[in-house]
Amino acid sequence: METPAWSIALSPSTADWRFRQFQREIREQASGDVSPILPVLTLAGPFTPRPGVDFLMVQNAVTSAGARGPAGYLLDDWGWRRNSSGWVLGCRVIPSAALRALADSLHQRLLPLVGDGGLSPPCWEVPLVRVEGRQPPVSLSTPAAPLEGRGLFSRLLSRLRPRAPVSFEVNSDLIPLCLPQDGLRLTIYSEEKSAGGYDLVTQTWLNRYRSTSREAWSRTLAGYREKAFCSSSRGGGPPYLISDLHLGHADIIQYCSRPFPDCSTMDRVLIAGWNQVVNAGDQVFFLGDLCGSAAQVPEYLPALSGAITWVRGNHDPFSEGNPECLAMTVDGVDLLLVHDPADAPPAFEGWVVHGHTHNRRLHRYPFLSVRERTINVSAEVIGYRPVSLSCLVEMIRTSDQDLLFLPFPG
């Protein structure tokens, strides 16, 4: 019996829903034969193990490489890559140094186990859909594939011989995803089916059943939150700022790729994180969208510490005490606090501190934009806990380049 090909990939982590949604949108828009592809970042493979190599040996190689722990990357532009049979639409990946080191370590451990053909270097893309034919769907406003020549002979050759893969071609008509991620699990795939994987957070091996269980995923996310932001100390003191908690809003977990398994866990973690930073007498400027709906405010507001100045968001109830914006000058820096940055007056020449955009438009509204003079304090962008206003002003004074999200000490 022929040995199936294996591959080792990072699961899409908290971006899985975003990828699946995009697959559905593309299939609805495109005409012709469009097939979804398993949306994972392949680090090694597909490869055929040499004779005598069993699954346990591959598992040990993955486990050894995975001891490095989670590794970050940025999901960036959408684009096309042409192959021998058609086109593949995917998302370009910008790997961190830690992810490149993880991939190198994995290759070093797998090479002695691989049969003929060896191992190809990682292709830093997450594929989403495959389109058969010589051109990608015109409905997606994608550039047509150029012919290899204008003469009859050249056109005949282009039809007869397989096309070599070409580099990733960014589709500028599609807004970049621009979403930072951390790889949390290495999974062994056989014919696109999971055969088990290694949890980079809990440092444990998961068989094919445990790797798909909600309970195991909850433990992974809990460990990740602890390492990623819950244990990081905040600098500076009050007053603090944050926006867009969206407590009680279950859909926001998938919509904004939040690292929570369910709404009750999200509510508990966000409230606890707020109260760990904010003491009873501390001033907090909250820039809107406390809950999923205005009716939920009486349920959640009493649970939050501090003296809250509330700039109204689009999900918040109308109140004379909740202004639409708030202007102030701190250490000589003019600031405008507003929920939606689009509502800032065009003539304002200071810095706009806002929420509303979450992590959905980081290409336009990152945590800090030097050129546009904006600071995004949406919960996802600042680690789900309030940040000191004095720290933000210091970053305005010292930063000479944009920052996608708030960096953490240590």
Image (cartoon, rainbow, N blue to C red):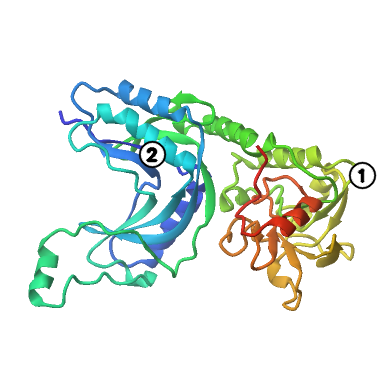
Give the alpha-carbon distance from disc 1 to disc 2, as whole Å. 48 Å
Q: Is residue 117 visible?
A: yes
Instruction: Classify residue 313 as left or right of residue 33.
Output: right
Q: Residues within 10 Å of mark 1 (few under 14, many from 20)?
A: few
Q: Nearer the viewer, residue 249 or 222?
A: 222
**Image quarter of residue 383:** top right
Identified by mark 2, the residue type is Ala
Q: Nearer the viewer, residue 300 or 280?
A: 280
Q: What residue did someone put label 1 on? A: 281
Instruction: Classify residue 372 as left or right of residue 345.
Output: left
Task: Residue at 76% x, 37% y: name it.
Answer: 272
Residue 60 location (% of width, % of height): 37, 22
Task: Residue at 66% x, 39% y: name it.
Answer: 229
Residue 83 location (% of width, % of height): 24, 57
Q: Nearer the viewer, residue 137 or 101?
A: 101
For marks 1 and 2, the one nearer the N-term is 2
Task: Residue at 57% x, 33% y: name it.
Answer: 218
Secondary element under disc 2, as helix, strand or loop, is strand
Q: What residue did someone put label 2 on? A: 9
Q: Is residue 323 visible?
A: no
Labelled pair 1, 2 in contact (Cβ < 8 Å): no
Instruction: Classify residue 56 as left or right of residue 396.
Output: left
Identified by mark 1, the residue type is Gly
Q: Residue furthest left?
A: 153
Task: Residue at 31% x, 59% y: name it.
Answer: 167
Residue 241 location (% of width, % of height): 78, 53
